[in-house]
Image (tube, coloured by chain):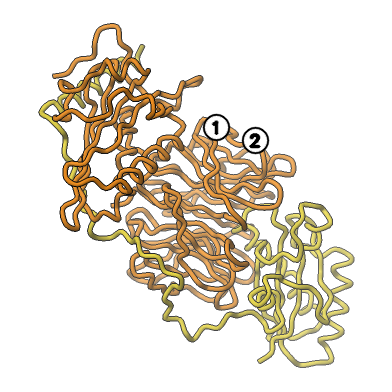
Chain colours: A yellow, B orange
């Protein structure tokens, strides 16, 4: 058989190579491999704080391990793999616009996804969701300079079970005040 | 020159033939040339046997059955009593010796084809005694080389994301002796680690600054730097094989596209310009093409493109969601995660397109990464409530869980073979 012939050739080549005795491969182990264990990585980025809007999903997660829900704005929910506002989403956005119209402060719009789907694609999908809400708020008369967006993809879920109910809760746009 | 005995089947270990049997091999304990170090001997044996077991290609014969495991004075075929090993059913046999002199450890191993009464090859290693696990990994890789012609993958590292020990998701590394080392301490969410082209640094995304941004950490010094990318979302840094640039996904105005960051000029060139989502760049090993995931056709699918002409070609034709493509180091295949019903599964497809082959059939599986020898894929599987790293061979017949314990392990990225 063809495969057998190839193997026999290989075998004889190897035999020639080692026929004179033990083949030597000296391996320099001294440099380049780290067996150091470090509990804290050194970071020279001391001017960076653990970010996210003060009461935002990321700040809450960093403190407690949970993204958290609530706040004074209504969450907007999306269909699977979609960044389009449906009827309920538009209604929630109108309510949020009404709140914002009478104020002047800045807010951050977070886009989130459920965990079905790959992490990097979901980061991009979350960005789209945040942008959809932003565009709708601008169309409803809110100044765009007040509105920033961020995506957390599937990384900051509000629940963890594998159910349609939980997945639906995670596919959300969430608005928080930017306190600065 | 040693010759295979007439009538004896040559020693072969191959995972591409269906119905392949695991080759029975014997691993004699390392014999000391100077004063013995029992701990070192057992660590070497544990790591070597572990690697060969994970490969799925070998069955290690119980050392209790070895008739005489003292190596011959000379590590050559003429000095081995093959009958002792044939009697216990071994087809492959490893002998080895070691010597500690001061702060240097020398290990030498030789591997024999028992029915063929031939030595297939040997290796000698020098290094600090703390590197004994790496010497065992390289010995396992050598055994795969001697029996298949292709060096094994076990002297390598897998970077991955884990929240073990807390809730923050940090970058960790895994080596096949089972050691898991925490690399970052960002105390927030990190994602998508990948290796620099010389496997000395890990590029990853972190939420440390508030929005997902790319960082790199040098494994040796643990020094981190934030990569010079523009504001907004940056994820999925993929080093070009020649080290000159990095592909990444960057979001601007809500739309995410693939960009190429040239390290010398710090210039970012936009490679995709489409209203759809374009993410997950993965280089072909010769650096001439990129595989990526795009929703330009309506649903997330795998495409390849020439970064020069920017012409994209769709690779996945069936299924409603195919993403996270990774190009095999031998250039021949692309692995990806494809949705089947409610779950995701790992598939491989020829890099030029064609029939995909499903490799996993239980749990929900994502984040494939290739072994350096293109024989195995490591991925994350969710089964029940948590996520762990698993290994599968390219036929899909052999599967092994790699990590255990509490928490979720995800986003594995397999380095090249070290050094």
Residue position marked by numbered label 2 in the rendering: B361
Determine whether A108 is above or below B309 in the image. below
Q: Residue B325 appears at what percent x and percent y?
A: 53, 47
Is the residue at mark 1 from the same chain as the one at mark 2? Answer: yes
Q: Is residue B360 left or right of residue B147?
A: right
Q: Is residue B322 left or right of residue B291?
A: right
Q: Locate residue B167: give its quadrant.
A: bottom right
Q: Is residue B303 visible?
A: no
Q: Residues within 10 Å of mark 2 (few under 14, many from 20)?
A: few
Residue under the point 57% across and 50% down = B404
Residue position marked by numbered label 1 in the rendering: B396
Determine whether B6 is above or below B400 in the image. above
Chain of residue at mark 2: B
Q: Residues within 10 Å of mark 1 (few under 14, many from 20)?
A: some
Q: Locate residue B77: give its quadrant.
A: top left
Q: Quadrant of the N terminus of chain B?
A: top left
Instruction: Kindly state the secondary structure of the residue where label 2 is placed.
Output: loop
Determine whether B309 is above or below B260 in the image. above
Q: Residue B369 appears at what percent x and percent y?
A: 49, 47
């Amino acid at each position: 058989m063809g495969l057998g012939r190839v193997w026999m050739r290989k075998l004889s080549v190897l035999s020639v190579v080692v026929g004179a005795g033990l083949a030597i491969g000296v391996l320099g182990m001294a440099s380049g491999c780290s067996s150091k264990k470090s509990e804290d990585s050194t970071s020279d980025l001391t001017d960076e704080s653990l970010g996210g809007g003060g009461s935002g999903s990321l700040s809450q997660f960093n403190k407690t391990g949970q993204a958290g829900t609530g706040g004074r704005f209504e969450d907007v929910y999306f269909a699977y793999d979609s960044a389009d506002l449906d009827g309920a989403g538009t209604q929630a956005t109108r309510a949020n616009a009404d709140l914002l119209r009478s104020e002047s402060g800045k807010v951050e719009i977070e886009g989130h996804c459920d965990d079905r789907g790959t992490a990097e694609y979901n980061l991009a999908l979350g960005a789209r969701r945040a942008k959809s809400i932003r565009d709708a708020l601008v169309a409803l008369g809110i100044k765009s300079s007040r509105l920033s967006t961020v995506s957390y993809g599937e990384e900051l879920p509000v629940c963890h079970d594998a159910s349609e109910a939980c997945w639906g809760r995670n596919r959300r746009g969430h608005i928080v005040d930017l306190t600065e | 020159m040693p010759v295979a005995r007439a009538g004896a089947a040559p020693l072969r270990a191959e995972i591409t033939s269906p119905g392949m049997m695991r080759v029975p091999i014997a691993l004699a304990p390392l014999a000391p040339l100077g004063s013995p170090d029992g701990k070192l001997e057992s660590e070497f044996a544990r790591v070597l046997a572990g690697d060969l077991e994970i490969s799925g290609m070998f069955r290690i014969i119980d050392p209790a059955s070895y008739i005489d495991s003292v190596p011959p004075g000379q590590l050559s075929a003429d000095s081995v009593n093959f009958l002792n090993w044939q009697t216990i059913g071994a087809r492959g046999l490893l002998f080895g010796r070691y010597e500690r002199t001061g702060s240097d450890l020398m290990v030498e191993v030789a591997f024999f084809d028992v029915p063929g009464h031939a030595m297939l090859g040997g290796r000698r290693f020098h290094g600090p005694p703390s590197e004994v696990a790496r010497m065992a990994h390289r010995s396992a890789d050598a055994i795969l080389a001697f029996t298949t012609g292709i060096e094994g993958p076990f002297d390598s590292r897998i970077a991955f994301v884990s929240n073990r020990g807390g809730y923050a998701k940090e970058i960790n590394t895994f080596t096949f002796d089972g050691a898991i080392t925490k690399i970052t301490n960002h105390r927030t969410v990190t994602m998508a680690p990948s290796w620099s082209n010389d496997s000395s640094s890990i590029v990853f995304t972190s939420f440390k600054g508030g929005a997902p941004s790319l960082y790199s950490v040098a494994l040796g010094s643990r020094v981190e730097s934030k990569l010079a990318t523009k504001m907004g979302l940056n994820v999925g840094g993929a080093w070009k094989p020649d080290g000159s640039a990095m592909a990444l996904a960057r979001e601007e105005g809500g739309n995410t596209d693939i960009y190429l960051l040239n390290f010398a000029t710090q210039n970012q060139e936009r490679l995709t310009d489409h209203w759809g989502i374009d993410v997950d760049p993965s280089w072909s090993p010769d650096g001439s093409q990129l595989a990526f995931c795009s929703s330009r056709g309506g649903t997330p699918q795998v495409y390849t493109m020439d970064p020069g002409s920017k012409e994209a070609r769709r690779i996945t034709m069936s299924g409603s969601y195919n993403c996270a493509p990774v190009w095999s180091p031998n250039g021949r295949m692309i692995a990806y995660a494809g949705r089947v019903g409610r779950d995701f599964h790992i598939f491989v497809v020829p890099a030029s397109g064609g029939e995909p082959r499903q490799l996993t059939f239980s749990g929900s599986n994502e984040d494939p990464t290739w072994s350096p020898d293109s024989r195995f894929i490591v991925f994350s599987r969710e089964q029940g409530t948590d996520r762990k790293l698993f290994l599968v061979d390219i036929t899909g017949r052999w599967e092994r869980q790699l990590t255990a314990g509490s928490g979720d392990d995800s986003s594995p990225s397999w380095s090249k073979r070290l050094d």
